[in-house]
Image (cartoon, grey):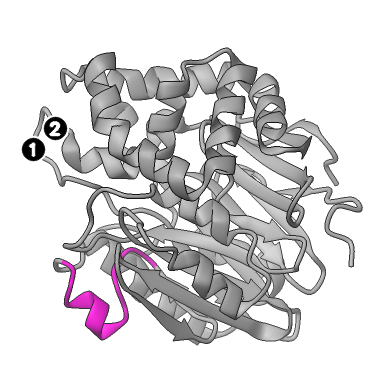
């Protein structure tokens, strides 16, 4: 098992960073340990903005309502973001922008004909004789390929957390000390607007102790938009909370999810699903219905799947699109009964899954 340092396959390295203390201290520790990757990541976002004519001053104005909402609702998480910028010696405005990127994207003019916002992430809960597994493929920009770390956090206040994440962003998916795991998937609805960035809501939900707590945290008032928050616990427990900026719905039971609303009422508040989200969900449901997939290896097989069209579960970047191409930048499997986690840096068909040594952090 990996207890720290770097691991990985196919040329990618996975850093496992242990942080502790208050929000600012944890952010600073993470920033210091990943400073080179933070700057590499911010260089990509800076280029994205420059290609659209967005300079530092305009970025500050675009970000202002989201920063204000974040400071009002979750000042501790804003402190963590600022600590990360301090530790990495990076521009705090740019780091905050990375944490509100899904809110900024619709506001940015794209220089070529493309969808306003790509669909992202695939997750499922797998149950069986080998236990309960949460599987998650983090689908993001290829420009952040390699800019990933696993944060093992022991906060002064709140449960311990183990979370793979793009280095500029707060932990959003993973396993907490209550034994509850979370995956998140991007969703869009027509009531999206100004408010708390989705990443901060996900960070809040990552501390949930159970279903009631998870619903309360994911439905925090003042959200800018929505996610599908998938949760799993031991004993085959699973449920998903779908949110828009103003409404939410709970989907009971272990299942799979991609990037469109499955609750009929919430679906009416959104545009038609994108083809890639639909194809991934169809294939995911078929694999879960087939049976034959069990335990960590079974979950990994599903996350490596390439069958669906126009978009498979294991998404590879289109070289013609450069850093803005969609790609799986990490893959995660959590065994809930055993409180174990495996993470693959990059596409899981190419990179080995590495077991993260949780030590005593998440001990019963």
Q: Position of residue 300 (x, y in %)?
A: 61, 61
Q: Position of residue 294 (x, y in %)?
A: 67, 77
Q: Residue furthest left?
A: 113
Check contact, mark 2 vs mark 1: CB within 8 A: yes
Please check the rendered image and state whether residue 266 is part of the magenta-colored stretch, yes or no: yes
Q: Which secondary structure is most common in the magenta stretch?
A: loop
**Residue 364 in the figure: left or right of residue 6:** right
| 209 left or right, relative to 280 | right
- Label 2: few (<14), some (14–19) or many (≥20) C-alpha neighbours in 10 Å: some
Q: Identify residue for label 2.
A: 110
| Residue 41, magenta (yes or no) | no
C-alpha distance separating marks 2 and 1: 7 Å
At 51% from the left edge and 72% from the top edge, which residue is drawn? 216
The reply to whether residue 185 is in sight is yes
Q: Residue at x 65, y 31 (%)?
A: 27
Q: Nearer the viewer, residue 69 or 213?
A: 69
Image x and y of residue 206, in percent: 60, 59
Is 357 situated left or right of 6 in this image?
Answer: right
**Nearer to me, 239 or 284:** 239
User: As displayed, is residue 342 above or below residue 323?
Assistant: below
Disc nearest the viewer among 2 and 1: 2
> Residue 285: percent from the left, percent from the top?
42, 79
Extreme-top residue of the structure: 89
Tell me where the magenta segment starts and ends, as one range: 258-270
| On-image quarter of the C terminus | bottom right
**Residue 337 quadrant:** bottom right
| Residue under label 1 | 113
User: Mark 1, residues whose alpha carbon is within 10 Å: few (<14), some, or many (≥20)?
Assistant: few
Give the residue displayed 30% in from the left and 62% down from the top.
245
Does 127 sit above or below residue 66? below
- Residue 167: image quadrant is top right
Helix, strand or loop at disc 1?
loop
């Amino acid at each position: 098992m990996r207890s720290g340092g770097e691991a990985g396959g196919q040329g990618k390295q996975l850093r496992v960073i242990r942080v502790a203390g208050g929000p600012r201290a944890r952010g600073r520790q993470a920033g210091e340990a990943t400073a080179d990757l933070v700057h590499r990541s911010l260089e990509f976002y800076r280029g994205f903005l420059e290609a659209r004519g967005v300079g530092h001053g305009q970025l500050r104005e675009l970000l202002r309502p989201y920063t204000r909402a974040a400071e009002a609702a979750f000042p501790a998480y804003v402190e963590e973001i600022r600590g990360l910028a301090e530790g990495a010696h990076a521009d705090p405005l740019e780091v905050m922008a990375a944490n509100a990127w899904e809110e900024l994207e619709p506001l940015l003019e794209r220089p070529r004909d493309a969808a306003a916002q790509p669909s992202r992430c695939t997750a499922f809960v797998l149950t069986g004789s080998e236990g309960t597994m949460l599987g998650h493929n983090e689908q993001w920009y290829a420009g952040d390929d390699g800019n990933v770390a696993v944060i093992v956090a022991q906060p002064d206040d709140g449960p311990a957390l183990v979370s793979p994440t793009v280095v500029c962003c707060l932990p959003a998916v993973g396993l907490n000390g209550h034994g509850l795991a979370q995956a998140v998937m991007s969703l869009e609805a027509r009531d999206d607007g100004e408010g708390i960035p989705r990443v901060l809501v996900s960070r809040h939900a990552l501390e949930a102790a159970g279903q009631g707590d998870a619903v309360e945290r994911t439905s925090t008032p003042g959200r800018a938009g929505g996610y599908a928050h998938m949760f799993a616990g031991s004993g085959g427990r699973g449920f998903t909370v779908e949110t828009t900026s103003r409404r939410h719905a709970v989907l009971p039971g272990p299942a799979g999810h991609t990037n469109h609303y499955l609750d009929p009422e919430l679906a009416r508040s959104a545009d038609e699903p994108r083809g890639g989200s639909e194809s991934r969900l169809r294939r995911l449901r078929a694999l879960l219905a087939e049976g034959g997939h069990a335990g960590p290896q079974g979950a990994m097989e599903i996350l490596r799947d390439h069958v669906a069209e126009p978009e498979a579960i294991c998404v590879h970047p289109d070289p013609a699109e450069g850093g803005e191409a969609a790609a799986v930048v990490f893959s995660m499997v959590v065994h809930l009964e055993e409180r174990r986690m495996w993470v693959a840096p990059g596409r899981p068909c190419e990179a080995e899954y590495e077991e993260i040594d949780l030590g005593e952090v998440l001990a019963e």
